[in-house]
Image (cartoon, rainbow, N blue to C red):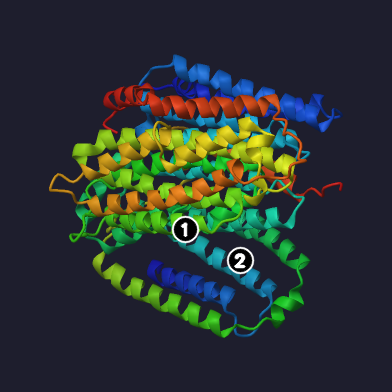
Amino acid sequence: MTGVGYSDLLAALAPETALVLAAVAVLFVDMGLMRSAPLRQRFLTACAVAGLGCLVTLGILASSGAHLRFLDGVLVVDSLTQWVKVFLVVLTLFTAGISAQAEFTEHVGEYFALVLLATVGMMFLVSTEEILMIFVSLELTSLSLYVLAALDKRTRHASEAALKYFLFGSVAAAFTLFGLSLVYGLSGATNLTGIAAGLRAHRSDPLLAVAVVMVIMGFGFKVAVVPFHLWAPDAYEGAPVPAAALIASGSKVASFFVLAKIAVLGFAGVEGSGAWGQLRAGWLPVLAVLAVGSMVLGNLTAIAQGHLRRLLAYSAIAHAGYVLLGLMAMGYPSQRSAALAAVLYYVATYGLTTVGAFGVASVIERVLGNGRIDALAGLSRRSPLLALCLMVFLLSLAGIPPLAGFFGKFGLFTAAMGADPAGLGLLWLVGIAIAMSTVSLYYYLRVLKQAYVVAGDEEASRIVVPWTDRLVLIAAAVGVFLLGALPELLLGPLARAIAGGNGF
Amino acid sequence: MQDILFYVFAALTLVCGFLVVANPISRSPVTSALFLVLTIVSLSGLFVLLHAFFLAAVQIVVYAGAALVLFLFVIMMLDLKAEERRRITRLGLIGGGLVAVAMAWLFRVVPREAALVASGPAHVEGSTPALGALLFTQYLLPFEAISLVLVAGMVGAILLSRKEPS
């Protein structure tokens, strides 16, 4: 480490440090001061402390504009990583917001501390280009999320889902680690640019093929693409709603960003080709197979779901397939920055939409006692606000203009169309994606039909939405609408950040 | 001498590793765990041959000492008789066989066509000062991040193992 002192490192890590301190503070406040207070008050206090920590972190992120690169890429801070961290902290803030009225556990302090620790892991994940650090931060995120998923100990079902998530996750982590160690063995480097240079002599090595597939398998689990998706429906349904929201939003944003980094920077030169009729070995065809599987299976299976959160899980699998199209477009240098901007816009707005949808699910499940889609009947009369928010989120997921989901999909698909300089190589994937988006409209509308058209119980009372949930839902819905109507609000700064970054 | 020792330790590792999962004499999980201890001890012998004395010691202290003792505790709390009675099913046999054939094929193909970077004698920075220096300079951040992983793990373990009052 030349010319870099420990204090420089600490200064660059100020946002993460603030969040860790917030996690410790939540633990102390809840265990020390609020011990005998009623559960409701403890949740509100802990939520306030965690929210304050998130706001301070956002402030630090907004005020720092330095471009730093420490220790061969162990820590990379530039405006792009700052933006992704802002997304992550905002999603965490919303997650904390929808947990404020929760009652699923008595371990309030631990719950919020783990949410914050998971976010710290995600923030480390996006600001590193070093495989050792990638693995450690991935484990920090995963371990916290496993525990969060298992927090609801009241039902057998939840424990089963958590165990499934944990077992799948640890096997996937083993695959990632094995793949990364093979990559290290081949290239002799642990930072991504060094890996790309070291792999130059080994492009046709079968060991490299094994390594690439294993690494992508591990991350395929994190982002829940077919065939590594089996945990997702159970975990989304069984975990406490806010924890599921974090698993579905923040963790996805960070995992997609780091997967793109590994593929584009680390596996540069082993792209292969995913164009129709001219598949060549590399990471592009692997992603193509995963994308097709996710889009087709995710969308078709979602049709048959009767539980709102299970439906969201299968729709998440489908959306992961769309994002993979954007990652594939990044494999072609001519389109790289446009595709990166499209991917980041998509995952950010998708995260926002998902947190909102889970927020609606959380209120509904608290009041109705179950999250089945049939139970939504008459929702528009019982709570116009909930029904309206649900409509905004689901239509955005379906990709209806002027909501953010439309622009996200539009950006991804145009990036994928224009990616191949030799022609419309990825057109076949875009074709499948558009056809499957049409299918997706059906199941989203089915939910909305329950909420708006089907008459419910006439005697049912109005649903009172607590102010914290109302705040989060309205903020998320307005965000989804604004970012869809004025995509430049986000795309402009993102493009500037990408242009000012280090080529990624 | 070195070569002979390498083959001895490598063979011990493989044989004990095999006996962990498929012991023809005893089906008791305790025997499996004890063979895992032997596997780890012979692995640390391999580390010694690479002059990585610190790694060898850590291998024994952490894995054989701490992790496996925990394993044994957990195993003792389970119903051992049920595990011993369990027979290998046909499906498991076929699946396991397929995986074994695939792995054997990989081991045949890959070493023939692949070359690792370090083709000469391996140079392992295994001495304690070198490792320590790396941990506090180049790999400082992962080292610190692991402490957060431990915090998360600890909070999680306390949380999940506590009995709920209801």
Report whether A97 appears left or right of B102: right
Q: Amino acid at mark 1?
A: Phe
- For mark 2, give the secondary structure: helix
- For mark 1, give the secondary structure: loop
In the image, residue B39 above or below residue A300: below
Q: Position of residue A339 (x, y in %)?
A: 29, 37
- For label 1, the crowd category at 10 Å Cα-Cα, with few meaning under 14, some 14 to 19 and many 20 or more, is many
Pick the residue in front: B139 or A235. Answer: A235
Q: State the image quarter where residue A364 is shown.
A: top right
Q: Amino acid at mark 2?
A: Val
Q: Position of residue A148 (x, y in %)?
A: 65, 43
Label drawn at residue A483: none
Report whether B100 appears left or right of A355: left
Residue at position x 70%, y 57% in the image? A157
Label drawn at residue A228: 1
Q: Residue furthest toward the top?
A: A63
Question: Is residue B130 something that shows in the picture?
Answer: no
Label drawn at residue B37: 2
* Residue at mark 1 shares a chain with residue at mark 2: no
In the image, residue A267 above or below residue A35: below
Residue at position x 57%, y 74% in the image? B21
Q: Position of residue B162 (x, y in %)?
A: 79, 48
